[in-house]
Image (cartoon, helix red, strand yellow):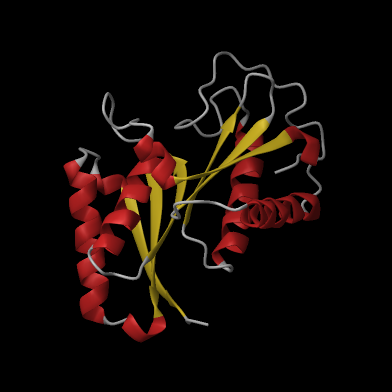
Amino acid sequence: MLVVVSLFLYIQVSGKEKEGTNSGSHLSEEERNELKSLMWQIRSNLHGENYGFVLDHAVLPNGNIEVIVKLGVNEIDKKTKEDIQQIATDVIKQNDFDSDLFQFNITSFYKSEKEGNRISQRLSYNDLMGDIMLSLNELGYDVVVQGEVSSDKNVIISLVLPHDKFDENTKKEVQQFATDIIKKYNFAIEIFQFNIRSYYNS
């Protein structure tokens, strides 16, 4: 996420909230596409590490880009944060973006729950997908949830199952549970796309 050309250097932002908003309406179509492509590549590289995560981004008032990563673990150690940031930074550099324009916010789904952010308002997309992962794990499904919020009309949820439990029955069950949770929090189910795949246990 480091924009080489001065793509975002001179971006004028008016009151941008951190989470929940993505690229910002003030960006040109070309800038939005550049940022979307970059985030897709970062997401793809993180997928290869089998992290359970939701990736989002926001344009900050100073014109910088915040990369938001939420993990489905209770505590995040320093090495994990460094590894994730390094993976993202490598992608940024490979795409000739200026890394100084990007900052990282790597937190846990559990943190949001403990802070009580769910009481007064509807869940953010990030917390929704965190809730899906935690709920499925509590039900005994060894599933990793990886989400991408590309806009408020397009949310992709990857449900990643161990290869030895990757059967049609389980695929249907986890998608149905995820759908039920989405409906429970009054999200429009039609904006969600499911991608159910497998990984090999090491």
Which quarter of the figure has residue 60?
A: top right
Q: In this view, does 125 lie to the left or right of 54?
A: left
The foreground one among 37 and 165 is: 165
Which quarter of the figure has residue 149?
A: top left
Q: In percent of the image, x 42 and y 46: which residue is there?
A: 109
At which x and y percent is residue 18? 52, 27
Q: Is residue 94 left or right of residue 179?
A: right
Outermost residue to the top: 14
At which x and y percent is residue 90? 76, 55
Outermost residue to the bottom: 164
Q: Say which quadrant the N terminus sits in.
A: top right
Q: In percent of the image, x 34 and y 60: which residue is there?
A: 194
Above or below residue 27? Residue 196 is: below
Q: In this view, does 77 lie to the left or right of 191?
A: right
At which x and y percent is residue 12? 67, 16
Q: Can residue 90 be seen in this view?
A: yes
Q: Is residue 153 visible?
A: no
Q: In percent of the image, x 18 and y 45: which residue is there?
A: 183
Q: In this view, does 8 lie to the left or right of 198?
A: right
The foreground one among 196 and 18 is: 18
At which x and y percent is residue 62? 69, 20
The foreground one among 113 and 133 is: 113
